[in-house]
Amino acid sequence: MKEELLHDALKHPPAGDLQPLTRLAPFVGAHPVDAILGMVFLTLSSASALAMTDGVRRVIDGGFTHRTEGELVQLFMTAGVIAVVLALSTGMRMYFLYKLGERVVVDLRKVVFRRVLGLDLAHFQKLKTGEILSRLTTDMTMVEGIVGTVAPVALRNLMTLVGALGWMLIVSPNFTGLVLALIPFLLTPLFLMGRRLQRLSLRAQDRFAEAVGYAGEGLGAVDTVQAFGQEDAVAARFNRSVESAFEASRAQLKARGLLSALMITLIFGGMIALLFQSTVAVVHHRLSPGRLVQLLALAFFAANAVRDLSDVWGQIQKASGAAARVIEMLDARPTIAAPAKATPLPRPALGEVDFDRVRFAYPGRRGPPALDEFDLHVRPGERVALVGPSGAGKSTVLRLLLRFYDPERGAVRLDGVDLREADPSEVRERLALVAQDAPLFSGSANDNIRFGSPEASLSEIRAAALAAQADGFLKALPQGYETLVGEHAKTLSGGQKQRLAIARALLRDSPVLLLDEATSALDAESERLVQQALHEAMRNRTTLVIAHRLATVLEADRIVVMERGRVVEEGAHGQLLAKGGLYARLAKLQFTAQTA
């Protein structure tokens, strides 16, 4: 039931300035106990505060000299009980509503992060990682505030306003009519400035997200920044972004300050007018002193509620802007997704790969397509090496096979099934990738290897590490396989990280192995060891190897030479050398570079 409520939030909201906030309703509804108890105690606290005014009226109108000691004790005991109810209900309201706010944000973060992880790569060309993190942190904190603090404060003030006006109507209808006549003057500026506050809030949050994005880029490549001596330049770029965010925020603060000043002026002007009218009524005996004090107290509660609502309104607009940015990620839909009725891949897996007249160009990238009328058929268990100059489209072949993108024309098939008709998760289960710069994660070496197969046993992890020639250096670490390797495994050398990535791919035990410059980060000795490990890993597996080092592809069953997104040659190493074509030129250049 809870999951259904959370997924209802993914539907399009109704129109209106506060429409992003309405999308939070299913997340609040997923925790009805906290929401209901919070509202009950909120109502009690508001009612208790208003009830105190009636006690004041009774004391003043009854007089101290005309009451017995027992009556006074009873009166003040009643006031004490009301005060205790007020204190307890306020504390319980804060507990349940703050808890609700944090719980909603936890659920929202889970749903948003999972949605972001499922987006295709084209989305990440539009948003920096830092901007996404800003939405998951800063914007989410504002959303937490709206649920746990701002919205309850607004509701409490609204209840206080309605309750105070209702009680005033009972005590003195004429006096209440004057108060009601003032309310439109108080609320008009509140709504007139609402749209402007929301626009200014959105602009400020966007500028701040840009600043976080620049900071993330700089910190993520701090070694490069320092190596090129560009600390000042990167800091200046961040400073400009922060200053822009400040200017946008200052414009919003000016608008909120103007609104608050206007509201206070109207409220106190109205209170002075009401005080004059009520004092005249007491002088002419149309109103008792006790009722006058009660009416003034209730009017103060009502005016204070309106004033607080004006402050809260600015926070609501700001939170609405934050919620809009979060909802934007909730509404993002991947273009790469499973069809309504996916075609299952045949079992057992064969590992047959087929590219049929494929044309593909990266979104937003000008120039010739990355692949153009590209044809490639890889038989089950065959080892095929893709070689060619940079930009020939070799890595694009692997990205299309992993279904990070779909071709514009033609078809990519795995075991005879067009990938567009299959479930991407099922396709990727049959592929194991070792990229040129294989990312690793914070945690232990064990954790990074197990990423390839979360259910793997310790013995299977050790076997994969042994096959990848990683067992030796992992055992030498302070805590062995349980040693923490740091963010992006920065405590390991390039060769060690690559061998760890190879172990991760071997543990996956998929029928198709994809190697994108898998040995490029290794020294000569490590490369020899890993080549031996990969030779065993390729056995009985379909393997696609991308390599610039020709020594890496010599054992391939077939070498496919690519240029400008097309296959221009294919065959064995000796055959291609004899042709004297592109492969022969590449081999000659590499041989010359190695012997120079």
Image: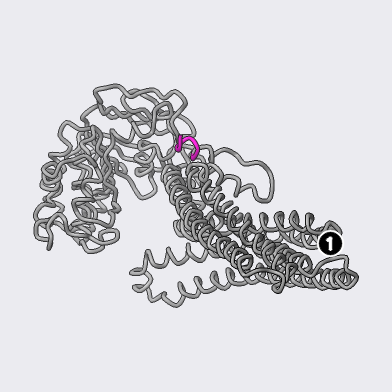
Q: Residue furthest right?
A: 284
Q: Is residue 3 magenta?
A: yes
Count of marks, rendered view: 1
* Image coords of residue 215 (percent x, y): 45, 67
User: What type is the residue that disc 1 sits on?
Assistant: Phe
Above or below — where is 437 with respect to 64?
Answer: above
Nearer-the-camera pick, 449 or 63:
63
Q: Residue at x 24, y 42 (%)?
A: 454
Quadrant location of the C terminus in the rendered image:
bottom left
Q: Which residues are magenta?
A: 1-6
Q: Residues within 10 Å of mark 1 (few under 14, many from 20)?
A: many
Please give left or right for residue 185 compared with residue 545 in the image.
right
Indicate left or right for 134 with 59 as reference: left
| Residue pictured at 36% horizontal, 24% vertical | 417
Q: Is residue 256 magenta?
A: no
Determine whether 4 is above or below 205 in the image: above
In the picture of the structure, the residue carrying the numbered disc 1 is 175
Horizontally, residue 229 falls left or right of residue 154, namely left
Q: Which image quarter: residue 416?
A: top left
Q: Nearer the viewer, residue 530 or 24?
A: 24
The secondary structure that most of the magenta stretch takes on is: helix
In the foreground, 184 or 74: 74
